[in-house]
Amino acid sequence: MRVAVGWPVQLVDGDVRLRPLRRRDADAWMTLRGRNLGWLEPWDATSPEPVRGPRPSFGQFVRALSAQAREGSALPFAIQRADRLVGQLTVSSIQYGSLRSAAIGYWVSQDVAGQGITPTAVALATDHCFGVLGLHRIEVNIRPENAPSLRVVEKLGFRDEGLRVRYLHIQGRWCDHRTFALTVEDVPEGLVERWHRRRATA
Protein backbone atom coordinates (compact mmCIF):
# COMPACT_ATOMS: atom_id res chain seq x y z
CA MET A 1 0.00 0.00 0.00
CA ARG A 2 1.30 3.44 -0.93
CA VAL A 3 1.33 6.05 1.83
CA ALA A 4 -0.73 9.13 0.95
CA VAL A 5 1.25 12.23 0.01
CA GLY A 6 -0.18 15.72 0.54
CA TRP A 7 -3.29 14.59 2.41
CA PRO A 8 -5.23 15.78 4.30
CA VAL A 9 -4.85 19.31 2.96
CA GLN A 10 -6.79 22.53 2.50
CA LEU A 11 -6.23 24.59 -0.65
CA VAL A 12 -7.39 28.19 -0.79
CA ASP A 13 -7.58 30.93 -3.40
CA GLY A 14 -9.67 33.98 -2.51
CA ASP A 15 -13.02 32.80 -1.17
CA VAL A 16 -12.73 29.34 -2.79
CA ARG A 17 -11.54 26.55 -0.51
CA LEU A 18 -10.91 22.85 -1.15
CA ARG A 19 -10.94 20.73 2.00
CA PRO A 20 -11.46 17.04 2.73
CA LEU A 21 -15.05 15.84 2.39
CA ARG A 22 -16.27 14.81 5.86
CA ARG A 23 -19.08 12.67 7.24
CA ARG A 24 -20.50 15.72 9.02
CA ASP A 25 -21.11 17.27 5.58
CA ALA A 26 -23.99 14.81 5.16
CA ASP A 27 -26.91 17.21 5.65
CA ALA A 28 -25.45 20.03 3.55
CA TRP A 29 -24.28 17.63 0.82
CA MET A 30 -27.61 15.79 0.60
CA THR A 31 -29.55 19.07 0.53
CA LEU A 32 -27.30 20.45 -2.20
CA ARG A 33 -27.54 17.32 -4.33
CA GLY A 34 -31.31 17.18 -3.90
CA ARG A 35 -31.73 20.81 -4.91
CA ASN A 36 -29.55 20.22 -8.01
CA LEU A 37 -30.86 16.83 -9.08
CA GLY A 38 -31.99 17.93 -12.54
CA TRP A 39 -28.76 19.90 -13.08
CA LEU A 40 -26.42 17.04 -12.12
CA GLU A 41 -28.17 13.75 -12.87
CA PRO A 42 -27.63 13.78 -16.68
CA TRP A 43 -23.85 13.61 -16.06
CA ASP A 44 -23.71 11.20 -13.11
CA ALA A 45 -21.85 7.94 -13.70
CA THR A 46 -23.85 4.75 -13.13
CA SER A 47 -23.04 1.07 -12.84
CA PRO A 48 -23.75 -1.16 -15.85
CA GLU A 49 -24.46 -3.98 -13.38
CA PRO A 50 -27.85 -4.16 -11.62
CA VAL A 51 -27.61 -2.58 -8.17
CA ARG A 52 -28.89 -4.96 -5.50
CA GLY A 53 -29.71 -3.95 -1.98
CA PRO A 54 -29.75 -0.46 -0.45
CA ARG A 55 -27.56 2.29 -1.83
CA PRO A 56 -24.53 3.19 0.32
CA SER A 57 -25.16 5.84 2.95
CA PHE A 58 -23.34 9.15 2.81
CA GLY A 59 -21.16 7.96 5.68
CA GLN A 60 -20.19 4.82 3.76
CA PHE A 61 -19.53 6.94 0.66
CA VAL A 62 -17.16 9.23 2.59
CA ARG A 63 -15.44 6.32 4.35
CA ALA A 64 -14.72 4.65 1.00
CA LEU A 65 -13.29 7.88 -0.43
CA SER A 66 -11.26 8.51 2.74
CA ALA A 67 -9.77 5.01 2.50
CA GLN A 68 -8.69 5.80 -1.07
CA ALA A 69 -7.17 9.07 0.15
CA ARG A 70 -5.17 7.26 2.84
CA GLU A 71 -3.90 4.87 0.17
CA GLY A 72 -2.92 7.77 -2.06
CA SER A 73 -5.21 6.78 -4.94
CA ALA A 74 -7.74 9.63 -4.65
CA LEU A 75 -8.27 13.07 -3.09
CA PRO A 76 -11.94 13.72 -2.21
CA PHE A 77 -12.46 17.46 -1.76
CA ALA A 78 -15.47 19.50 -0.73
CA ILE A 79 -15.66 22.81 -2.60
CA GLN A 80 -16.50 25.72 -0.35
CA ARG A 81 -17.21 29.33 -1.19
CA ALA A 82 -16.56 31.28 1.98
CA ASP A 83 -18.19 29.00 4.60
CA ARG A 84 -20.77 27.39 2.29
CA LEU A 85 -20.51 23.95 0.72
CA VAL A 86 -21.15 24.43 -3.03
CA GLY A 87 -19.84 21.26 -4.65
CA GLN A 88 -17.31 18.47 -4.78
CA LEU A 89 -14.05 17.82 -6.62
CA THR A 90 -12.34 14.45 -6.64
CA VAL A 91 -8.87 13.67 -7.91
CA SER A 92 -9.04 9.99 -8.85
CA SER A 93 -7.05 7.28 -10.62
CA ILE A 94 -3.79 8.63 -9.17
CA GLN A 95 -0.95 6.67 -10.77
CA TYR A 96 2.77 6.90 -10.15
CA GLY A 97 5.59 4.99 -11.82
CA SER A 98 6.20 5.91 -15.45
CA LEU A 99 2.74 7.48 -15.90
CA ARG A 100 2.37 9.85 -12.90
CA SER A 101 -1.14 10.87 -13.85
CA ALA A 102 -4.58 11.50 -12.36
CA ALA A 103 -8.09 12.50 -13.41
CA ILE A 104 -10.22 15.29 -11.97
CA GLY A 105 -14.01 15.20 -11.73
CA TYR A 106 -16.21 17.92 -10.26
CA TRP A 107 -19.69 19.30 -9.77
CA VAL A 108 -21.06 22.53 -8.31
CA SER A 109 -24.47 23.87 -7.45
CA GLN A 110 -26.26 25.48 -10.38
CA ASP A 111 -26.71 28.75 -8.50
CA VAL A 112 -22.93 29.35 -8.41
CA ALA A 113 -22.09 28.01 -11.89
CA GLY A 114 -20.30 30.47 -14.15
CA GLN A 115 -18.83 32.48 -11.27
CA GLY A 116 -15.27 31.16 -11.55
CA ILE A 117 -15.54 28.76 -8.60
CA THR A 118 -15.05 25.54 -10.54
CA PRO A 119 -12.07 26.74 -12.63
CA THR A 120 -10.45 27.99 -9.43
CA ALA A 121 -11.05 24.64 -7.71
CA VAL A 122 -9.65 22.68 -10.67
CA ALA A 123 -6.61 24.97 -10.82
CA LEU A 124 -5.94 24.55 -7.09
CA ALA A 125 -6.17 20.76 -7.31
CA THR A 126 -4.01 20.63 -10.44
CA ASP A 127 -1.24 22.72 -8.86
CA HIS A 128 -1.35 20.49 -5.76
CA CYS A 129 -1.04 17.38 -7.92
CA PHE A 130 1.88 18.79 -9.88
CA GLY A 131 3.70 20.54 -7.05
CA VAL A 132 3.11 18.28 -4.05
CA LEU A 133 2.24 14.86 -5.45
CA GLY A 134 4.80 15.17 -8.23
CA LEU A 135 2.39 14.10 -10.96
CA HIS A 136 3.10 14.84 -14.62
CA ARG A 137 -0.36 14.79 -16.22
CA ILE A 138 -3.91 15.73 -15.23
CA GLU A 139 -6.91 14.89 -17.36
CA VAL A 140 -10.61 15.77 -17.30
CA ASN A 141 -13.16 13.69 -19.22
CA ILE A 142 -16.38 15.45 -20.25
CA ARG A 143 -19.43 14.48 -22.24
CA PRO A 144 -19.59 16.55 -25.47
CA GLU A 145 -23.10 17.76 -24.50
CA ASN A 146 -21.99 19.12 -21.11
CA ALA A 147 -21.48 22.77 -22.08
CA PRO A 148 -20.90 24.17 -18.54
CA SER A 149 -18.13 21.63 -17.88
CA LEU A 150 -16.56 22.26 -21.28
CA ARG A 151 -16.34 25.96 -20.41
CA VAL A 152 -14.29 25.12 -17.31
CA VAL A 153 -11.49 23.41 -19.22
CA GLU A 154 -11.66 26.04 -21.96
CA LYS A 155 -11.15 28.83 -19.42
CA LEU A 156 -8.16 27.01 -17.95
CA GLY A 157 -6.55 26.16 -21.28
CA PHE A 158 -6.68 22.37 -21.06
CA ARG A 159 -5.68 20.68 -24.33
CA ASP A 160 -8.44 18.81 -26.18
CA GLU A 161 -7.06 15.33 -26.86
CA GLY A 162 -10.07 14.01 -28.70
CA LEU A 163 -13.05 11.71 -28.30
CA ARG A 164 -13.19 8.52 -26.23
CA VAL A 165 -15.99 6.47 -27.72
CA ARG A 166 -18.43 4.86 -25.23
CA TYR A 167 -16.00 5.75 -22.46
CA LEU A 168 -18.19 5.84 -19.33
CA HIS A 169 -21.54 4.44 -18.24
CA ILE A 170 -23.94 7.35 -17.62
CA GLN A 171 -27.60 6.96 -16.68
CA GLY A 172 -28.03 3.54 -18.25
CA ARG A 173 -25.87 3.73 -21.38
CA TRP A 174 -22.26 3.95 -22.49
CA CYS A 175 -21.46 7.56 -23.41
CA ASP A 176 -18.73 9.24 -25.43
CA HIS A 177 -16.44 11.68 -23.62
CA ARG A 178 -13.89 14.22 -24.76
CA THR A 179 -10.55 14.09 -22.97
CA PHE A 180 -8.78 17.28 -21.93
CA ALA A 181 -5.32 17.28 -20.37
CA LEU A 182 -2.41 19.30 -19.08
CA THR A 183 1.13 18.22 -18.30
CA VAL A 184 3.34 20.02 -15.84
CA GLU A 185 5.36 21.52 -18.72
CA ASP A 186 2.22 23.31 -19.95
CA VAL A 187 1.96 25.47 -16.82
CA PRO A 188 5.44 26.25 -15.48
CA GLU A 189 3.98 29.24 -13.63
CA GLY A 190 1.19 27.12 -12.11
CA LEU A 191 -2.41 26.81 -13.25
CA VAL A 192 -3.79 29.13 -10.57
CA GLU A 193 -1.47 31.89 -11.76
CA ARG A 194 -2.45 31.33 -15.38
CA TRP A 195 -6.13 31.36 -14.43
CA HIS A 196 -5.68 34.69 -12.62
CA ARG A 197 -4.04 36.21 -15.70
CA ARG A 198 -6.77 34.92 -18.00
CA ARG A 199 -9.51 36.30 -15.77
CA ALA A 200 -7.81 39.66 -15.58
CA THR A 201 -7.70 39.99 -19.38
CA ALA A 202 -11.12 38.46 -20.16
Image (tube, rainbow, N blue to C red):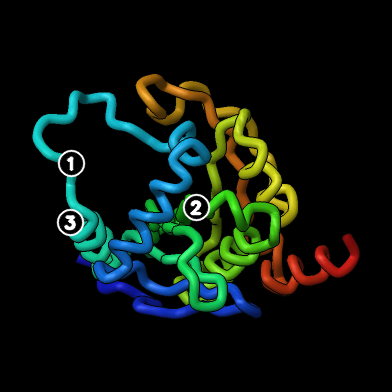
Label 3 Cα crowd, 10 Å radius (few <14 / some 14-19 / many 20+): few
Which of disc 2 and disc 1 is earlier in sequence?
1
Identify which residue, 95 or 71, lies in the foreground.
71
On the image, the x and y values in percent for residue 50 come to 19, 24
Q: Give me the residue at 35% from left, 78% from top.
A: 8
Estimate the spatial distance between the alpha carbons at disc 1 and disc 2, rounded to whole Å: 21 Å
Image disc number at residue 55: 1
Marks 1,3: beta carbons within 8 A: no
On the image, the x and y values in percent for residue 123 come to 62, 65
Q: Give me the residue at 48% from left, 36% from top.
A: 38
The quadrant in which residue 27 appears is bottom left
Identify which residue, 110 or 200, lies in the foreground.
110
On the image, the x and y values in percent for residue 16 come to 58, 73
According to the picture, the residue beneath numbered tag 2 turns out to be 106
Q: Give me the residue at 60% from left, 28% from top.
A: 163
On the image, the x and y values in percent for residue 69 come to 30, 66
Three-letter amino acid code of the residue under disc 2: Tyr
Label 2 Cα crowd, 10 Å radius (few <14 / some 14-19 / many 20+): some
According to the picture, the residue beneath numbered tag 3 turns out to be 60
Q: Give me the residue at 28% from left, 31% from top.
A: 47
Look at the numbered disc 1 and give the secondary structure of its residue. loop
Number of numbered callouts drawn: 3
Identify which residue, 161 or 74, lies in the foreground.
74
Which of disc 3 and disc 1 is earlier in sequence?
1
